[in-house]
Image (tube, rainbow, N blue to C red):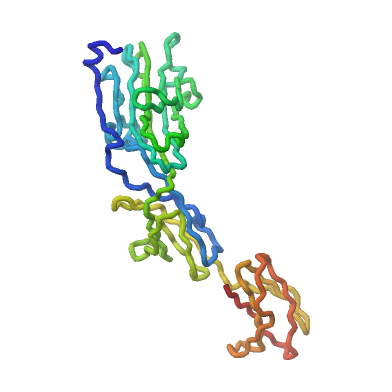
Amino acid sequence: MPSFLQRLLLVLTFTAAARLAAAPAPAPILLSPADAATNVGLDPSLTWGWRDELIVNGGFGTVLSAGWTVWGLSPRGMWKRVVEPPNDGLAEADLSFSRLDATTLTQIVTLPADTTSALFGWLERLPPSGSVPPGMPSPGLRADVTDGQTVLETLHESNGDEPEFQGGGWAARIADLTAYAGQTVYLRFRAWSSDRPAGFYARVDGVSLRVERTDLPTFDLYLGTSLPLGPANLIAQVNALSHDLNGLPANTRHCWQVGAVRDGVTNLSRVFSFTTEQIAPTLTVVSLASDRVTIRFDTRVDRSYTVQQADSLSSLGWTDGLPGAQGTGSPMTLELPLASSGQAFLRVRVDP
């Protein structure tokens, strides 16, 4: 129980994340076709992934207070925002003050009931254990899930002995919070120390809670053959993680981008590109005799191939030498008779 003096020194800043306006929907993550893919079919399905971000101010880019509650028994030892290049901001608890029992950094989040995956991640840093004078306790940092009073789960606890800290580096942590779908919880970082000399700290940065949901925002899909993509390239608005295209031109480079729309704000993905297949296959002469020729060409299972033959390049002189053969997905090898004129032209017509 804090003493009367400790209660007088209590510093509390509170901005509940649950009361903040809904944040804009994070940008989608493009998946397929892979960026710069070639030989893509003319009827591709574009797919992307999307995760909601529930943490407010996880990078501490401008202030500490937005989204976070700070508590401690000493104003000097409270969590505060500091800048340490190349970071634009991070949260630091100064643990160098004598008998600093604990200081906490907390954010309230409500995981939507339709959550299917919730990954809580953060970066942390403590002084390496070798820098602690002999006989003195190491500083500690613990990440908890609480209901506001009781710890429901300790996600990770560090004391500086971890190998990641020995070179003065950051440690990346991740925890699965899917089990808390539909609940409002407190995500809390608790730092502590006692009888510390100057210069000891706990640091946190890059906090995120990425949630996959069944209830998706609206996605704007942009497609074009040149950059930049703009309003004229908007081809669909969907509430799904994929969209089927039909009848794209062959052997053409396409650029695409997806924007996630929520509350009138659009966050755009990066731009991917792909090149459609050359639908007319290349004919290769395998063997040639005076009265017959053997040819080979690549095929697809969803296409029909007709080999046509003519004695001249006149558009009226073509006849079907092999009508309507269904592709197998493998090269097709055919032997065809040659006319006695001594001259022949061959081509392949491809039908969907």
User: Measuring 33% from the left and 15% from the top, which residue is drawn there?
Assistant: 100
Residue 55 percent across, percent down from the top left: 35, 37
When the figure is inspected, residue 17 is found, relative to residue 138, above or below; the finding is below
Relative to residue 28, is residue 62 drawn left or right? left
Q: Is residue 29 above or below residue 181?
A: below
Q: Front-most of 179 and 128? A: 179
Q: How many marks?
A: 0
Q: Position of residue 237 (x, y in %)?
A: 38, 60
103 horizontally vs 163: left or right: left
Q: Residue furthest top?
A: 135
| Residue 344 placement: quadrant | bottom right
Above or below: residue 170 compared with residue 327: above
Rendered location of residue 51, percent (x, y): 42, 45
Q: Nearer the viewer, residue 160 or 242?
A: 242
Quarter holding the N terminus is top left
Residue 229 to residue 289: above or below: above
Residue occupying image coordinates x 51% and y 62%: 44
Q: Residue at the spot x=37%, y=61% of the render?
A: 229
**Which residue is outermost to the left?**
8
Image quadrant for the C terminus? bottom right
The front one of 48 and 178 is 178
Q: Is residue 323 left or right of residue 229?
A: right
Residue 275: where, in percent of width, then height? Answer: 51, 63
